[in-house]
Image: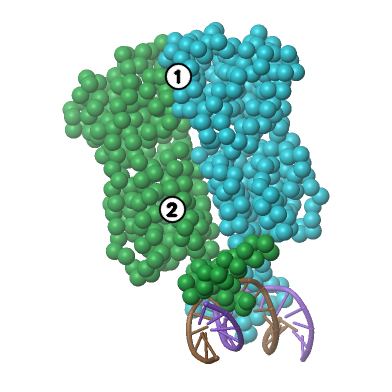
Chain colours: A green, B cyan, C purple, D brown
Amino acid sequence: MSPMTVSRALRDDKTVSEATRTRIRQVASQLGYVYDTTAQAFRTQKSGFVAITLPSINNANFAQTFRALSDGLAGTGNQLLLGSTNYQVGKEEEHVRQLFSRNPEALVLTGGYHTDNTRQLVAARGLPVIEMWDLPAAPLGHAVGFSNAHAMTAVVRHLAETGRRKLAFVGASDGADMRGAARRQGVLETARTLGLPEVALLDAGPAPVSMRHGAGVVAQLGADVAQYDALVCVSDPVAFGCLSACQRLGIRVPEDLAITGFGCFEVSEVANPRITTVNVNAHKIGEQVVAVLRDILEQPEELEPRLIDVGSELVPGETS
Amino acid sequence: MSPMTVSRALRDDKTVSEATRTRIRQVASQLGYVYDTTAQAFRTQKSGFVAITLPSINNANFAQTFRALSDGLAGTGNQLLLGSTNYQVGKEEEHVRQLFSRNPEALVLTGGYHTDNTRQLVAARGLPVIEMWDLPAAPLGHAVGFSNAHAMTAVVRHLAETGRRKLAFVGASDGADMRGAARRQGVLETARTLGLPEVALLDAGPAPVSMRHGAGVVAQLGADVAQYDALVCVSDPVAFGCLSACQRLGIRVPEDLAITGFGCFEVSEVANPRITTVNVNAHKIGEQVVAVLRDILEQPEELEPRLIDVGSELVPGETS
DNA sequence: TTGAAAGCGTTACCAC
DNA sequence: GTGGTAACGCTTTCAA
């Protein structure tokens, strides 16, 4: 058997006969042969990498999207190359630079906010880009996501319809979590539109904020938290923290105070009472990104930019 | 200028004179020359990759370890290449093969259980291996972790000392989560040693089990769950699910029933009551793995295998 | 359906 | 301090 035939057999080239192919594969696995993708990447000038940045790996939503991407790419001979920025916007550029050194064939970014340097870096490369988890006003290329601000409209409307008027938003103080900031904006605007009183902003600390930050906000306020009708939280973990702290304080949810979360995390379904939340289809985002990626990777000619809105829906629970 | 001199100049080789180096760099940037890392990786057979497999990316513990690794490797010019197996042991071999095709310089595996094929694959490669989150009896190379079985001894002792006798273990039914299986084993053995009645095994479904699975187990048992003195759960999320379901059933925790978790997840600290758990130093595991990796990557000669026990400690809460 | 030759961009090794 | 040669493992191309 010539190397050439082996090469073809391992790539499932149709010109190789069924018999030789199975024989070659068998011998290869017996010999413990491992295909060298580096050499392939070198020869074909295609790395087989798709670069992806995530603000955090420790987040059920992003993890789900990542998994959908990973699964969806599995059959295509492409691999994900991950850079996790831990919510430091400044780190994105560094990560993108490092990812670029591997010659990725496409770049998947989380969110629509990037530093000027990052934008330049990406533009200079001229590789296909997909921004996800957001619908940027001026996308770098393709985008798959939903409007974080718009999603909050449904939440605030729901609260207003059930008689809540004095709202407080619980989220990160800094602007590092851009999606969180968009949600806050959505809450403020909708409340204004509906003629509700000014929404209070309760600072849960720097991003990423989670359960203990939500609990901390309520614990610090103590009984004063009852001055609000509803706590609109930036995420489910924060909402759960608030709920738990309320229960310790003897504040009844939802009788004394409504609480809402965001993201349809497992904790909201299991918590007692179940937390009202917003489903953002993390898995669907991954699937749609995969769909775009497949098209990108198959046909090298530039695709016309796509803007895919996966939407979001209110999931009423027992806390509102 | 010969290609050779250019190559040396761009790599800051000292044998190139200062004058030629600066001239070469200048011309290179003028021409828009881009250094090809893929070709370098191919030629030198050094990829700058450290391969890592995780059973799940959506797990706060593993995410923390991953982050510690990622941060610790940042300065070294090496990148992590991730394969997430989603608790399918059979998938590990496939992932390792895929990771190997990129010529990683070291391999970090989660857990000490691997298929024979995986073991052969790894042995044939002869690359440095670190197993983490476990202390295998026969390590493939280095190991950084703790004894899952031993950690449970502390839990069961604690329960016995506080008068609990009839225990039930809540965990996955299949053996896909090897660390979970080791924990179960630790519970069974310690109970036997202490002369407690036979521990009941409550099946929460196939791995990975989480909040809703814990809640499901208790909901299905209903009031019958009160026949036990304590639910020993394979992880904190499962424990939280059990706790929440008990609260819905009106079963008092810890008065009627004790509940313990594992892994020091945020939910256990914030839950009401706080859940008794075990701290396993996820971040420390990452740091120790980094320490070993740095030594491995610096000196190519084979290191003598290290076995690092990061230990674990009981964190008493309000559920026991 | 299979094989032979050439070459992808870099660097190890040796010569000058 | 600089340059020539060969080779890494694969695939494109052309020939049989």
Q: Is residue A163 visible?
A: yes
Residue A277 percent across, percent down from the top left: 34, 30
- Local crowd at mark 1 within 10 Å, few (<14), some, or many (≥20)? some
* Residue under pointer 1: B219
- Disc marking residue B97: none
At 61% across and 73% down in the image, what residue appears?
B10
What's the amino acid at mark 1?
Ala
- Number of callouts: 2
Whole-number angstrom distance, CA of label 2 to CA of label 1: 35 Å
Quarter of the view holding residue A255: top left
Of the residues tagged 2 and 1, which is closer to the observer? 1
A109 displayed left or right of B53? left
- The quarter in which the N terminus of chain A is drawn is bottom right
Hey, which residue is sitting farthest front in the picture?
A19
User: Eyeballing the image, is A51 above or below A62?
Assistant: below
Q: In which quarter of the view is residue B301 placed?
A: bottom right
The chain letter under disc 2 is A
- Residue hosting label 2: A72
